[in-house]
Amino acid sequence: MTTIAELSLGADEFALGETLAQLPDVSISVESVVAEGPTRTMPLVWFSNVEREELEATLEADETVDDYQRLLEATEGGDWFYRLEYAEGVGSVCCAVYENGGTVLDAQVTDGQWTLRLLFLHRVELSETVSAMEDRGVRVDVRRMVEAGQDDDLETTAALTDPQQEAIAEAYRQGYYDVPRKISLEELASELGISHQALSERLRRANRVLASEQLENPTGELATE
């Protein structure tokens, strides 16, 4: 079933982190992304609230950008339109979406965080994309997810990805949440075949999703001990 997901990635781990650090007032919105090969991606990007000379000097120094080309002169509102070529590391993260059959519907940056709105024909493709991004060292938060035909409102729908579901289910089965714990985080990570840090991040995000669902749509009493 078609799945639309909203992912959050830190700019300092993903793309244009240096540009955002040097130009804190700049607004960035991606028009579209063209992928060529397994690591080469060229987004078409709108920049606002910045002068051309300052923007291009910053892009020149940004290690996540291999090349850039101005496509349009400034609009009446002072917006600039560029085609960028991401460096290999960023390109491989972007290509993880396309390798798993995904489509980028929207991409924007706010307060140092990228928000990607993605579409997949099957939910498993979303799960595989998130895992691929994490394997490349990028922390990913699945902020919203909705399956077509169930709910069109991304603001009120949240769910676990398959890796998060697997991690939290195994943690429960192995007694990680028992008092005292029956298994350590390191031991659990070893059994799942992932790193200690990756498991910690995965459980944290899963717990946050479950907690938000409980607080927003309570179905029973919360434990107090």
Image (spheres, grey):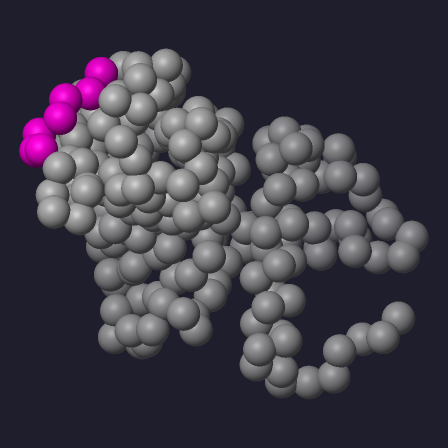
Q: Range of the magenta residues? A: 67-73
Q: Residue at x 62, y 42 (%)?
A: 201
Q: Residue at x 17, y 48 (%)?
A: 77
Instruction: Locate the N terminus by quadrant.
Output: bottom left
Tell me where residue 78 sits by quadrant.
top left
Q: Residue at x 12, y 47 (%)?
A: 76
Q: Left or right: where does residue 219 sit relative to residue 52?
A: right
Between residues 184 and 141, which one lies in front from this camera angle? 141
**Relative height, residue 52 to residue 104 (above, below):** above
The image shows residue 219 at horizontal and vertical percentages of: 62, 85
The image shows residue 109 at horizontal and vertical percentages of: 37, 44
Residue that extends furthest to the left in the rendered view of this protein? 72
Say whether residue 126 is magenta. no
Viewer can see residue 53: yes
Residue that extends furthest to the right in the rendered view of this protein? 180
Residue that extends furthest to the bottom in the rendered view of this protein? 220
